[in-house]
């Protein structure tokens, strides 16, 4: 794999698509999909444009995307696309949404790129695990290295919830950190990679919400914990991932998984 070419293609695509999405931002009319989430014509246009651009450059690769293709292909390399992560924010004029592109090798993410056009933020990271691949390493924000925080939980540190994890607030014990809710699954978890938050939880993310971020978060030294205790990767060829959710806890240091689990483990049990 020519990693420089691959990163350049991902950045060029998201820059081009992001400029058009900024033009549509706050003006697109949203409709409700069968799973209760929103979709706009901007989502559909961005999905199609990104898929076409990737296949034009990498015709031998597979593509799985939120709006069109949900069956994982039998190809060695596959891209997973979330054309607008945070569609509700996008449609309502809240400037926190992103374009997420992950590259999988033999079913497991090895590269992630997430552009957040309203903030002019561009995240990317490389995480090879036990794939046997070699290349550049690390996680980056606007090409500057980022790392998970080494701080201890406290009332001055942040932890992110999602809209479906507010049951955390029913626990009578005081939560170890200040709570935030951002409205974008990828940005929720990327704040941990960047050291801004100590942890975050997503109750029902789909594979396109997490494929790119999975690589970036781990490249930044954070810890990913599947709340349903099921292995996420490798994805299986021929399987339809449209309905599958992956309840997830991400924390800055592995020893803090046990600290936050009493508040969030019910999310894995409810899936």
Image (cartoon, helix red, strand yellow):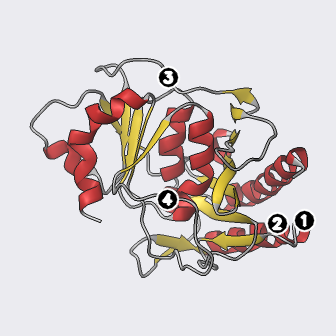
Q: Which sits earlier in the primary sequence, circle 3 or circle 1?
A: 1
Q: Which sits earlier in the primary sequence, circle 4 or circle 1?
A: 1
Question: What residue is drawn where x is 63% and y is 52%?
Answer: 212
Q: Which sits earlier in the primary sequence, circle 2 or circle 4?
A: 2
Residue 94 in view, yes or no: no
Q: In the rendered view, does 100 fall on the left or right side of 32? A: right
Residue 270: quarter of image = bottom left
The foreground one among 66 and 96 is 66
Q: In the rendered view, does 23 fall on the left or right side of 61? A: left
Label ID, residue 232: 4
The foreground one among 264 and 127 is 127
- Tell me residue 227's x, y (percent): 34, 52
Q: Give the secondary structure at mark 1.
A: helix
Q: Give the secondary structure at mark 4.
A: loop
Q: CA distance from mark 2 to mark 4?
A: 24 Å
Q: CA distance from mark 4 to mark 1?
A: 28 Å
Residue on which the image places disc 1: 57
Q: Give the secondary structure at mark 3.
A: loop
Label ID, residue 116: none
- Tell me residue 137's x, y (percent): 74, 34
Q: CA distance from mark 2 to mark 3?
A: 34 Å
Q: Is residue 45 above or below residue 119?
A: below
Q: CA distance from mark 2 to mark 1?
A: 5 Å
Label 2 with label 1: CB-CB less than 8 Å: yes
Residue 155 in view, yes or no: yes
Residue on which the image places disc 3: 149
Residue on which the image places disc 2: 54
Q: In the rendered view, does 146 fall on the left or right side of 2? A: left
């Amino acid at each position: 794999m020519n990693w420089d070419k691959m990163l350049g293609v991902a950045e060029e695509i998201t820059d081009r698509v992001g400029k058009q999405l900024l033009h549509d931002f706050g003006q697109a009319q949203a409709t409700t999909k069968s799973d209760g989430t929103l979709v706009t014509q901007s989502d559909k246009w961005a999905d199609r444009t990104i898929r076409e651009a990737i296949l034009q450059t990498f015709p031998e690769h597979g593509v799985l995307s939120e709006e069109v293709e949900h069956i994982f292909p039998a190809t060695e390399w596959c891209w997973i696309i979330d054309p607008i992560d945070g569609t509700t924010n996008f449609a309502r004029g809240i400037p926190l949404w992103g374009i997420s592109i992950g590259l999988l090798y033999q079913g497991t993410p090895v590269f992630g790129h997430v552009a957040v056009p309203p903030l002019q933020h561009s995240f990317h990271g490389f995480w090879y695990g036990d794939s046997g691949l070699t290349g550049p390493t690390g996680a980056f924000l606007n090409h500057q290295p980022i790392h998970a925080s080494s701080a201890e939980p406290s009332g001055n540190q942040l932890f992110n919830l999602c809209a479906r994890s507010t049951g955390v607030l029913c626990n009578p014990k005081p939560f170890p950190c200040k709570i935030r809710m951002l409205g974008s699954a990828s940005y929720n978890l990327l704040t941990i990679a960047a050291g801004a938050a100590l942890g975050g939880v997503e109750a029902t993310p789909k594979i396109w919400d997490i494929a790119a971020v999975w690589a970036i978060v781990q490249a930044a030294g954070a810890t990913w914990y599947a709340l349903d205790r099921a292995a996420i990767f490798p994805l299986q060829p021929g399987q339809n991932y449209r309905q599958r959710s992956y309840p997830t806890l991400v924390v800055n240091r592995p020893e803090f998984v046990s600290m936050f689990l009493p508040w969030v483990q019910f999310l894995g049990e409810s899936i």
